[in-house]
Structures are given as C-alpha cells and as structure tokens.
Amino acid sequence: MTDDLTVTCVISTKDRYFTTLPQALIAVCMQTRKPDHLILFDDGEQRDLRGDSLYSHIFSLLDYYGLKDNWQVAFGERKGQVLNHIKSTHIAKTTWIWRLDDDNVPEHDVLEKLVKNIRPNVAAVGGLVITSTDIQLLPKLASNDIEDIYLGMNEQWYLHPEGSKPREVDHLYSSFIYRREIAEYCNELSPVGHREETILTYSFKAKGYVNILEPSAKTWHFRNPTGGIRSHTNAQYYTNDERVFSRYMQEWNIKPKDHVYAVLDNGIGDHYAFKYWLPEYLDRNKDKKCVFFTCYPDVFSDMSIIQGSIADAKQMFPDIDRFNIYKWMLDNNWKKNLPWAFKQMYQVHGNGNKEKCTRTGTGDAIIISPYSHGSKHPKSYPHWTDLVLMLKTTGLRLIQIGVTGDERLLGVDDFLQNQSFRQIEKLIDDCRSWIGVDNFLQHLCHCRPVTPKGIVLWGISDPQLFGYEYNLNVIGKRLRPDQFGTWQIEPDPSVFWDAEEVFKRIQLFIKGN
C-alpha cells in the first residue's frame, strides 16, 4: 500500500488576529515541506482582514510559498474549536490533516519530519509542543500512556535528549497530523474541547492503528493568555468534558492509574530511614502507581520502584514543603525516631509492632564512618586520632569508609572511598561492629534484614530522634536545643566525650557482643 501524503493545515482561531495568529501563519509559510492546502477557521470577530496591512503581507507570502488558490478562510459558528475540526474533516480533500493551534509556532521542518513517519498502519504523528516560557528537559516520569493521563506530565511538553527516536504512544496532544477519513471527533465536548485530542488519537489506537511521537519535531507554544479557549470562563465546560472523557475511558476498558508520591529532598540517611518502611508503603499502595522523587536514587537500586529527581518534583508541585519530614516533625512536636516519623507522615499502616532484628557481629573488622559532611562539620567527631590508636589494641581490623575529599584517619588498615551502597551493606553484614557519627550509616544499618549492633558518637543531635536504642549511643556533654534548624559552622570539641571515655564504652560494648 502506497500512502497519499497530501496534507491540509487546519488552524482554528478566536480573537487572536494581532497576537499569535500571524506568527502561526508565517511559520506555515516557512515549512521545508509545505502543506498542500490551508484552512483557517475564524470563530471570533470574523472581520475581513484583506484590507489590513499586516495580513496583506501574510496573504502574499501564502501565495508566494505555493499555497496560491489553496488557502481559505472559513467562518465558524462561534461554538468552539471542536466543531471547526469536525467540519475540517469534511471540507479538506487531502488524506492527512495537520492541526495547528493559533498560538503554535512550528519550527521550519516540523511538517517534513512528521510526514516522514507515515506508514500504512499509522493514524497520527505528533512532535513536541513546548511552552516557550517554560522550556524544561524531559522528566523520567513523563508519560503518554493512557493509564497515566491524570499524571499531568505529557512527554510532548518537554525537550527530549538529542538523538531520541520516534516511538509509539497511546495519545497525542495539541498539534499533529492525522488521517482524515478515519477521524471521529467527539461531538459532545464543550466549546473549550477539553480532552479533544486525547479522545481523537486514542480512538485511533482503539481501532488498531498506531500513533507516533517524533521528538525531533518541535513546535513552540506561545500560550496566549487571551482568546482561543481562554475566552470561555464557564468552569462547567471542563466538568462536562471530563465526564464525557470518563465515559470513553470506561468504554475502552481503561482504568487510570491512581498516583501517590513521596518526595525525599533530604540526605542519604533520611532516604534509608524512609526505606525502612518502604515494603509496607508499597503494600498499602499496591493498587496505585507509586512515584518517588529522590536525591540519592542508588539507595533504592535494589528495589523495583519508579524514581524521579527533585527537579521533577518541583515541576509537578509548586511547593514541596508539604513533603519536608523535618517540618512535619517540628509541626507535630515529634519525639520518636526518624523512620517512625516517615511512617506517620506517609500514613503507612503496616506492622505497627515491627521489631528490629539485631545480631552479634562475627567478622574481624570494625567499619568506621567518621564524618558527617566532612571532618569540619559540627556533627563529626573531633578526637579520631586518639580513638583509632586505642581501637588498634582490640586486634580487629579498622576499615574507614568515606568519599573523595575525606581525610584518612591515621592508623586505619584500609580506607575505602566512594563505595556503592550495596558494597557498604556487604561490609556491614560481614563486620564485627561499626562506629559512626550522626550520619547515614546507622540508618543504612537499620535497613539491613539483620543488623550488627554498632556505636554512634553523638554530640549535638538527639539519638531519641535520629538514633536507635539497640546501638551503643555515646551521647556528648551537650545536645543542641533546636534539632531541626541550621547547623553551626564549626564543631565544638568540648561537646563530645574525649577518646578515652569513648573507648571505655566501646570496649565494654564489643566484649558484651
């Protein structure tokens, strides 16, 4: 089967004669692959533009660029764009229609790229339609799957990575080419035509055809605040259209996915504190699509979950403060530890009596994580040099873990930098014990199926909030009154127990093991 590649460009306009419509028309003229016909539906004032100086230039360009005698203005009935698009399928004589909004500006090669994707089984081809004042990269979570229709992150709204290939999608948005003869617009929609394109393009798929997204074809959406569907202020229009769309979804036997979200704009330890309850969270929301916005996705690399970035979260939510665990703890005068705060905040109703299974370490090494955000951080223990010399007398190997830029402690047997979380977990599982400060390590250990007990050197944080009672919590001489505010810049050595006092406790703890 050889396709007839003739195309009619259809623009429905309302009260945008001197705002965005001229740019849309000029962009059509400049296409490397010109449409064979152009129909402009005027649903607004319907004035005669032939005497206007601006439009005299535009009409002249239409003639010059090959559309002479092949463009026309049709007056609509002022009943909205859906009716105009329905009429276009009867007026047009070409096989394909390119629908273009009157505030769209397609790049010069858009139509050429769309047409190149035509195949016998293809019903519609669309490119990107990006709001020009909000240019953002494609989030991982964006989706044109019909089940994700209420996610509100259409793939066509974002820039795709260079070299992205065309692919099949469930539905298309705003501007695309489609087969005229198989198009069935819904005639029950209001003048705003909410869900118009979704219903049209998914109906193609329901008939066995294919919709294609061509990410290299970019159309810029100038999103004019006046005119077009924004002329209509009746909220009932959208309510009616949503009701119609819901009926279509039922007829297609599609159940939209209900989404739930967690935003972890926090440190590594906070990610592990949340992870402790993650199985229960997933079980509670097993009938929903769970989306996690994280700073440290590798924490969850051993679990099959959907993750996005914090930048993605800020695109979706105007204010992510409602996901701030520390704000929640402060607002709720929280006195228990961090994992249980996550449990309450995210309403995880799993095993309320979940007990932590701890064990005696059997390895020959002590794992040391000495710093919190560097050696100069106020939570980092300042007497490590003396403490390591004393630990050497235990006969156990001392393995320091850290990242590039950390200082190696004098006397440790190994200094392992930039270990993956899985590698650190393996070290913890095989060690005799571990020593850390108020950092991520205790939370990572708490997430192990069976945790070797460890030692945490506290100075200014409250172990009741951020620690675990089964560990040896060596509490400093002074706890910081405000546990949720900004940390001081320099550590105060007098806050912490000196090395001798700490070692006495560690000796007893290890022997007790």
Image (cartoon, helix red, strand yellow):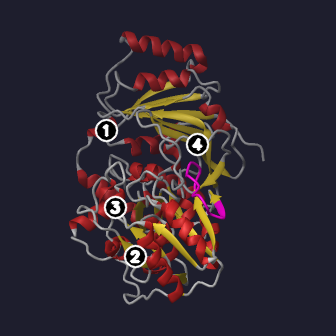
Counting residues from the start of the chain, the first of labels 4 and 2 encountered is 4
Q: Which secondary structure is most common in the magenta stretch?
A: loop
- What is the C-alpha distance between the residues marked 1 and 2? 74 Å
Residue 446: percent from the left, percent from the top? Answer: 48, 77
Secondary element at tag 4: loop
State whether residue 103 appears in this view: yes
- What is the C-alpha distance between the residues marked 3 and 2? 29 Å
Question: Which residue corresponds to mark 4?
Answer: 160
Question: Which residue corresponds to mark 2?
Answer: 473
Question: Which residue corresponds to mark 3?
Answer: 323
Range of residues picked out in magenta: 403-415
Residue 435 included in the magenta stretch of the image = no
Question: Which residue corresponds to mark 1?
Answer: 78
- What is the C-alpha distance between the residues marked 4 and 1? 37 Å
- What is the C-alpha distance between the residues marked 1 and 3? 45 Å
Q: Amino acid at mark 2?
A: Asn
Counting residues from the start of the chain, the first of labels 3 and 2 encountered is 3
Q: Nearer the viewer, mark 4 or mark 1?
A: 4
